[in-house]
Image (cartoon, rainbow, N blue to C red):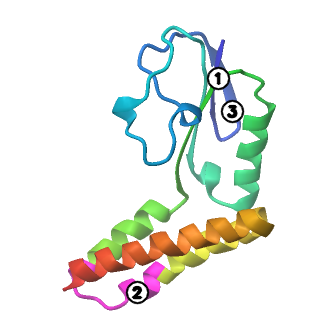
Protein backbone atom coordinates (compact mmCIF):
# COMPACT_ATOMS: atom_id res chain seq x y z
CA UNK A 1 0.00 0.00 0.00
CA UNK A 2 1.47 3.37 -0.97
CA UNK A 3 0.40 6.67 0.49
CA UNK A 4 0.66 9.86 -1.53
CA UNK A 5 0.44 13.04 0.52
CA UNK A 6 0.03 16.63 -0.46
CA UNK A 7 -0.84 19.43 1.98
CA UNK A 8 -1.89 16.92 4.59
CA UNK A 9 -4.37 15.09 2.36
CA UNK A 10 -3.76 11.37 2.27
CA UNK A 11 -4.83 9.28 -0.67
CA UNK A 12 -4.13 5.57 -0.82
CA UNK A 13 -3.31 3.56 -3.90
CA UNK A 14 -1.30 0.45 -4.55
CA UNK A 15 1.44 0.41 -7.15
CA UNK A 16 4.84 -1.03 -7.92
CA UNK A 17 7.98 1.03 -8.48
CA UNK A 18 10.01 -0.02 -11.51
CA UNK A 19 12.42 2.90 -11.56
CA UNK A 20 14.24 3.40 -8.38
CA UNK A 21 15.60 6.25 -6.31
CA UNK A 22 14.99 7.48 -2.77
CA UNK A 23 16.89 10.02 -0.72
CA UNK A 24 17.60 7.31 1.86
CA UNK A 25 19.55 5.42 -0.79
CA UNK A 26 21.03 8.46 -2.50
CA UNK A 27 23.49 10.74 -0.77
CA UNK A 28 23.74 14.42 -1.62
CA UNK A 29 25.82 14.91 -4.72
CA UNK A 30 25.40 11.30 -5.87
CA UNK A 31 24.15 10.87 -9.40
CA UNK A 32 20.65 9.46 -9.74
CA UNK A 33 21.90 7.31 -12.61
CA UNK A 34 24.22 5.39 -10.25
CA UNK A 35 21.63 4.60 -7.55
CA UNK A 36 20.10 1.13 -7.62
CA UNK A 37 17.12 -0.07 -5.59
CA UNK A 38 15.19 -3.32 -5.57
CA UNK A 39 12.40 -3.37 -8.13
CA UNK A 40 8.86 -4.22 -7.20
CA UNK A 41 8.89 -3.00 -3.62
CA UNK A 42 5.96 -1.00 -2.30
CA UNK A 43 6.76 2.57 -1.36
CA UNK A 44 5.09 5.40 0.47
CA UNK A 45 5.55 8.53 -1.63
CA UNK A 46 4.96 12.07 -0.37
CA UNK A 47 5.23 15.28 -2.41
CA UNK A 48 5.02 18.70 -0.79
CA UNK A 49 5.59 22.19 -2.13
CA UNK A 50 4.22 25.69 -2.42
CA UNK A 51 1.72 26.56 0.29
CA UNK A 52 2.19 23.09 1.85
CA UNK A 53 5.65 24.25 2.93
CA UNK A 54 4.94 27.98 2.92
CA UNK A 55 5.47 28.60 6.64
CA UNK A 56 7.16 27.02 9.63
CA UNK A 57 3.80 25.68 10.86
CA UNK A 58 3.04 24.09 7.48
CA UNK A 59 6.52 22.53 7.40
CA UNK A 60 5.93 21.16 10.89
CA UNK A 61 2.66 19.62 9.64
CA UNK A 62 4.54 18.00 6.75
CA UNK A 63 7.13 16.58 9.16
CA UNK A 64 4.35 15.10 11.31
CA UNK A 65 2.76 13.42 8.28
CA UNK A 66 6.08 11.86 7.33
CA UNK A 67 6.85 10.75 10.89
CA UNK A 68 3.39 9.19 11.33
CA UNK A 69 3.80 7.17 8.13
CA UNK A 70 5.09 3.83 9.38
CA UNK A 71 5.99 2.55 5.91
CA UNK A 72 9.38 0.90 5.69
CA UNK A 73 10.26 2.62 2.41
CA UNK A 74 9.47 6.31 1.97
CA UNK A 75 10.19 8.78 -0.78
CA UNK A 76 9.69 12.45 0.08
CA UNK A 77 9.83 15.13 -2.60
CA UNK A 78 9.87 18.74 -1.43
CA UNK A 79 9.78 21.69 -3.80
CA UNK A 80 10.10 25.41 -3.08
CA UNK A 81 8.25 27.24 -0.32
CA UNK A 82 5.27 29.33 -1.32
CA UNK A 83 6.25 32.26 -3.59
CA UNK A 84 9.97 31.33 -3.69
CA UNK A 85 9.90 30.22 -7.33
CA UNK A 86 8.36 33.57 -8.28
CA UNK A 87 10.99 35.34 -6.17
CA UNK A 88 13.77 33.50 -8.03
CA UNK A 89 12.29 34.39 -11.43
CA UNK A 90 12.12 38.01 -10.27
CA UNK A 91 15.78 37.91 -9.22
CA UNK A 92 16.81 36.69 -12.66
CA UNK A 93 14.64 39.26 -14.43
CA UNK A 94 16.07 42.10 -12.35
CA UNK A 95 19.65 40.94 -12.90
CA UNK A 96 19.07 40.62 -16.67
CA UNK A 97 17.56 44.10 -16.70
CA UNK A 98 20.59 45.46 -14.82
CA UNK A 99 18.34 46.48 -11.95
CA UNK A 100 20.42 46.70 -8.75
CA UNK A 101 17.36 45.85 -6.66
CA UNK A 102 18.05 42.16 -7.34
CA UNK A 103 20.34 42.32 -4.28
CA UNK A 104 17.50 43.44 -2.00
CA UNK A 105 15.24 40.79 -3.54
CA UNK A 106 17.90 38.16 -2.83
CA UNK A 107 18.03 39.36 0.77
CA UNK A 108 14.26 38.78 0.96
CA UNK A 109 14.77 35.16 -0.16
CA UNK A 110 17.46 34.76 2.50
CA UNK A 111 15.23 36.26 5.21
CA UNK A 112 12.24 34.08 4.30
CA UNK A 113 14.30 30.92 4.71
CA UNK A 114 16.23 32.18 7.74
CA UNK A 115 13.10 33.14 9.69
CA UNK A 116 11.51 29.79 8.91
CA UNK A 117 14.63 27.95 10.07
CA UNK A 118 14.74 29.97 13.30
CA UNK A 119 11.20 28.76 14.05
CA UNK A 120 11.94 25.10 13.32
CA UNK A 121 15.54 24.41 14.25
CA UNK A 122 17.99 25.02 17.06
CA UNK A 123 21.52 24.16 18.11
CA UNK A 124 23.77 22.37 15.65
CA UNK A 125 20.91 21.74 13.21
CA UNK A 126 20.20 25.47 12.97
CA UNK A 127 23.89 26.37 12.66
CA UNK A 128 24.41 23.77 9.95
CA UNK A 129 21.34 24.86 8.01
CA UNK A 130 22.20 28.57 8.21
CA UNK A 131 25.75 27.86 7.08
CA UNK A 132 24.46 25.97 4.04
CA UNK A 133 21.83 28.64 3.37
CA UNK A 134 24.45 31.41 3.35
CA UNK A 135 26.66 29.31 1.08
CA UNK A 136 23.78 28.80 -1.36
CA UNK A 137 22.79 32.49 -1.24
CA UNK A 138 26.39 33.49 -1.98
CA UNK A 139 26.42 31.13 -4.96
CA UNK A 140 23.15 32.65 -6.19
CA UNK A 141 24.58 36.13 -5.70
CA UNK A 142 27.62 35.24 -7.84
CA UNK A 143 25.41 33.81 -10.60
CA UNK A 144 23.12 36.83 -10.52
CA UNK A 145 26.12 39.15 -10.65
CA UNK A 146 27.34 37.31 -13.75
CA UNK A 147 23.90 37.75 -15.33
CA UNK A 148 23.86 41.43 -14.30
CA UNK A 149 27.18 42.15 -16.00
Residue 23 visible in the shown view: yes
> Along the line of sight, which residue is nearer the eye, 12 or 124?
124
- The residues tagged by marks 3 and 2 sit, at their Cα atoms, a distance apart of 37 Å
Mark 2, secondary structure of its residue: helix
> Along the line of sight, which residue is nearer the eye, 121 or 37?
37
In primary-sequence order, the first of circles 2 and 1 is: 1
Q: Which residue is mark 2?
A: 103
**Which span of residues is magenta-colored?**
95-106
Q: Is residue 42 above or below residue 44?
A: above
Q: Quadrant of the N terminus?
A: top right
Mark 1, secondary structure of its residue: loop
Q: Position of residue 65 (x, y in %)?
A: 75, 37
- The residues tagged by marks 1 and 3 sit, at their Cα atoms, a distance apart of 19 Å
Corner quadrant of residue 121:
bottom right
Corner quadrant of residue 18:
top left
- The residues tagged by marks 2 and 1 sit, at their Cα atoms, a distance apart of 42 Å
The residue lying at 44 percent from left, 22 percent from top is 36
Q: Position of residue 60 (x, y in %)?
A: 76, 51
Q: Is residue 63 above or below residue 69?
A: below
* Tag shown at residue 9: 3
The residue lying at 42 percent from left, 42 percent from top is 30
Asked if the stretch drawn in magenta spans residue 149, the answer is no
* Tag shown at residue 16: none
Amino acid sequence: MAIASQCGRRESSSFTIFASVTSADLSLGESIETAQLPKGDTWSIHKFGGTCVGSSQRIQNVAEIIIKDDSERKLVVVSAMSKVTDMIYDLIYKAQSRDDSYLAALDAVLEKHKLTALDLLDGDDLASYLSRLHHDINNLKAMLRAIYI
